[in-house]
Image: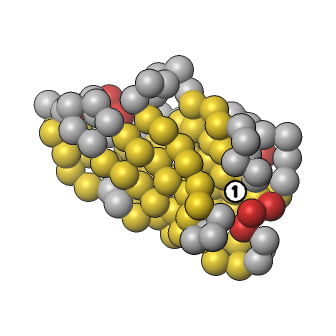
């Protein structure tokens, strides 16, 4: 099992940057594919980006490609989401998620077994 705790959310102006972190506890973090999802009010949870357990494969949603970067540090058991050129439509609760091994990041939330509690990101115009 793995437990996930997100941090780094907050209020930022449009065009600004934030870096989210997801710290994991438990065993074998390096064996988990990790991903970030977000959920805005009255909207479904959507995939933002993910990184394979090996770190070799990263994938970002079209809506954030070129602005957001996902990375992982297995020694620190942490996955990051670097967000830049933020827009008001990026406002949401951001969640970290994990599933064991896998072929790479999956866009469907049903694939992931473990979730953090979420961190709020608010982008003002």
Kind of element beneath mark 1: strand
Residue 64 in sight in this render: yes
- Judge left or right: residue 107 versus residue 118: right
Question: From this viewpoint, which residue is outermost toward the bottom?
Answer: 26
Picture quadrant of residue 108: top right
The answer to whether residue 64 is above or below residue 109 is above
The answer to whether residue 21 is above or below residue 27 is above
Residue 113 in sight in this render: no
Which residue is located at x 64 percent, y 77 percent? 25
Closer-to-camera residue (114/57) = 57
The answer to whether residue 48 is above or below residue 18 is above
Picture quadrant of residue 107: top right
Query: Considering the image in quadrants, where does the C terminus appear?
Result: top left
Picture quadrant of residue 51: top right
Residue 92 x, y percent position in the rendering: 38, 43
Residue 61 x, y percent position in the rendering: 56, 27
Q: Which residue is mark 1?
A: 98
């Amino acid at each position: 099992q793995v437990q996930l705790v997100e941090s780094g959310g907050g209020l930022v102006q449009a065009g600004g940057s934030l870096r989210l972190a997801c710290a994991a506890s438990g065993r074998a973090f390096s064996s988990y594919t990790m991903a970030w999802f977000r959920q805005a009010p009255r909207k479904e949870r959507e995939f933002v980006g993910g990184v394979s357990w090996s770190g070799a494969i990263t994938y970002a949603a079209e809506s954030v490609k070129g602005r957001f970067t996902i990375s992982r540090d297995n020694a620190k058991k942490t996955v990051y989401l670097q967000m830049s050129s933020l827009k008001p439509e990026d406002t949401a609760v951001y969640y970290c998620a994990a599933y064991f091994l896998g072929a790479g990041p999956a866009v469907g939330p049903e694939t992931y077994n473990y979730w953090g509690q979420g961190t709020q990101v608010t982008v003002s115009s």
